[in-house]
Amino acid sequence: MRIHDDYSLLDNNTFGVDVKADYFMEYDNVEELKQLLDTDLLRERRFLNIGGGSNILFVNDFHGVALHSCIKGIEKLEEDEDKVTLRVGAGEIWDEFVQYCCDNSYGGAENLSGIPGSVGAVPIQNIGAYGAEVKSIIKQVECISASSGRAKTFSAEDCHFAYRDSIFKHRLKGKYIVTYVVFELKKSSWQPCTEYGSLSTEIKKYDKPTMQNIRLAVLDIRKRKLPEPKVLGNAGSFYTNPVIERTKYEKLKDQHPDMPCYEVSRNMVKVPAGWLIEQCGWKGRSVGKVAVHGSQALVLINKGGANGLDIINLSDQIRQSVRDKFGIDLKLEVNIVFG
Ligand code: EPU
């Protein structure tokens, strides 16, 4: 384990906000995590578990302990002709794991290619893209209780996964630290999933929708639409796509005939937040050191040297205009952390 004080988090948040944590602790295995949880240093302070820092916005210096998992490893638990079960350390890089799955013809993760962050973070917000959600390949989530240091394994059902959501964002927020995620991936029964709008077009450039080709197609779309965090600080979608009542959607569609939607249930539909923001004239607009990305209005970017408040101020203006024009309240996807 490694313990640092007065630690710069600049390389630990993809927004590229220059803040510090009072302490930064890295652990390589579950035993080390338990030891850290038992130290006075940690017991007496607030803490935050930070993976790749790809879904977080620090408003100011973090006066507490930032805990960072370096638990590595991909262990095969079971395998037959049809499927394989893998136990993966929370500190593995998510996209390297997706690459590993595609290389070995283990199917189910390929549509989620290119998403920044660590494996331990993916169950928290049930990452999703191009017609897939990670919940469909998660079998179990292994955790350590932050208060007792005891291990607990959650089944996929226990996690209450929903669109960009899980129990770890609500009732159990901050209470458990993910140590391993157990995935079940398909082998012989794998079927490509390429119906999602832009992917269905992109995949036609390839002769067959193999796992590798789906990965390449997804990476290409992402490259065109989403900014590379190392070049332009960002945390992907800043908002979730709002789910609204179908009756409200139909009224809005009378005024805005091009308004897209995805089906959720008989009474509810999901509206792309990027579309709403673009309609309010924000796409590509800069305010000081921050901007709305020119290819995907759902993404706010740090053009260099912005702080958390600059980004929140822009976000507040965007949310106000969407409220004024459509009567819809945008909810943040990014976790805002106040010092
Ligand atoms: N759209 C616009 N203007 C924009 C952006 C989008 O009009 O600036 C419209 C598009 O034309 C399209 C619709 O919105 O009709 C959907 O766009 P897109 O396929 O880009 O997907 P999204 O709903 O905006 C979601 C995820 C992304 C994910 C993509 C692809 C959320 C909050 N975001 O965006 O996830 O990559 O679908 O599956 O659900 C992330 O979570 O960080 C992320 C980038």
Image: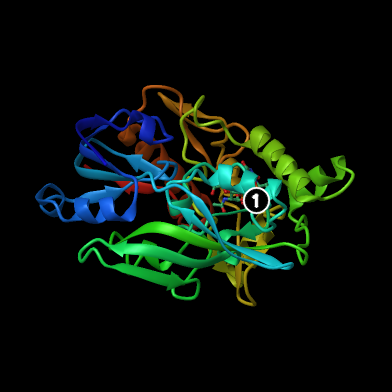
Residue at image mark 1 = 101
Q: Is 186 placed left or right of 288 in the picture? A: right
Q: What quarter of the picture does the N terminus occupy? A: top left
Q: Nearer the viewer, residue 325 or 307?
A: 307
| Up-down relation of residue 10 to residue 267 (above or below) | above
> Where in the figure is residue 32, as x and y percent of width and height?
26, 50
224 vs 72, left or right, is right
Asked where in the image residue 107 lies, by quadrant, the reply is bottom right
Pick the residue in front: 21 or 337. Answer: 21
Q: Is residue 263 above or below residue 5?
A: below
Toward the viewer: 211 or 301? Answer: 211
Q: Quadrant of the C terminus?
A: top left
Q: Which residue lies most toward the right here?
A: 207
Q: Residue at x 35, y 37 (%)?
A: 313
> Which picture quadrant has residue 261?
bottom right
For ligand 1, tell me if the residue under mark 1 lies within 8 Å. Answer: no
Q: Secondary structure at mark 1?
A: helix
Q: Amino acid at mark 1?
A: Cys
**Residue 61: percent from the left, percent from the top?**
22, 35
What residue is shown at x 56% (from left), y 62% (from top)? 183
| Residue 68 screen position, x and y as percent | 33, 44
Q: Residue at x 36, y 63 (%)?
A: 143
